[in-house]
Image (spheres, helix red, strand yellow):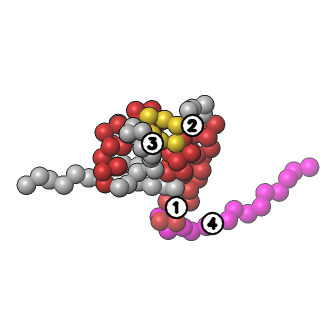
């Protein structure tokens, strides 16, 4: 006995809608993968930078600009909690440093 296939349905999406759908799926998948990784709960700046895939200087710059993942400074040394890094990634926050302004 042969199965009948249902007719194909066409869904029209704007580029922005498609970007939102794909972006949300990627953020969820990335957050799930990062959650399953065996890492420390509290990381140094260098460890957090490696975890996120950025240079430590990028994290420093973001801190001075008031952007990027949340951090704490309990003993004069910057520390990042893994759950804060994961939340920042899952939020879809900009994953690139802000463009530099030309010096005058």
Q: Quadrant of residue 41?
A: top right
Depth order, front residue of 36/7: 36
Q: Name the mark on residue 7.
A: none
> Who's the residue at 60% across and 50% down the image?
28
Q: Earlier in the sequence, mark 3 or mark 1?
A: 1
Residue drawn 52% across the image and 37% down it: 42
Q: Which mark is residue 74?
A: 3
Look at discs 3 and 1 and give the one toward the viewer: 3
Dot 4 alpha-carbon crowd within 10 angstroms: few under 14, some 14 to 19, many 20 or more: few
Residue 41, label in figure: 2
Foreground residue among 71 and 24: 71
Cβ–Cβ under 8 Å for marks 2 and 3: no
Looking at the image, tell me whether mark 4 or mark 1 is earlier in sequence order: 4
Which secondary structure type mostly characterizes the magenta part of the structure?
Answer: loop
Residue ID at (50%, 68%)? 14
Q: Nearer the viewer, mark 1 or mark 2?
A: 2
Instruction: Choose mark 4 or mark 3, whichever is in front.
Output: 3
Among the 4 quarters of the image, the one containing residue 104: bottom left
* Region in magenta: 1-15
Q: Which residue is mark 4?
A: 10
Q: Position of residue 78 (x, y in %)?
A: 40, 40
């Amino acid at each position: 006995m042969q199965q009948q296939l249902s007719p194909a349905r066409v869904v029209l999406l704007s580029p922005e809608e498609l970007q939102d759908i794909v972006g949300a799926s990627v953020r969820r998948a990335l957050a799930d993968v990062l959650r399953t990784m065996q890492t420390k709960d509290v990381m140094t700046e260098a460890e957090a930078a490696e975890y996120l895939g950025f240079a430590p200087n990028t994290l420093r710059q973001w801190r001075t600009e008031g952007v990027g993942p949340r951090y704490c400074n309990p003993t004069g040394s910057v520390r990042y909690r893994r759950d804060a890094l994961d939340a920042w990634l899952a939020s879809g926050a900009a994953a690139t440093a802000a463009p530099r302004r030309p010096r005058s």
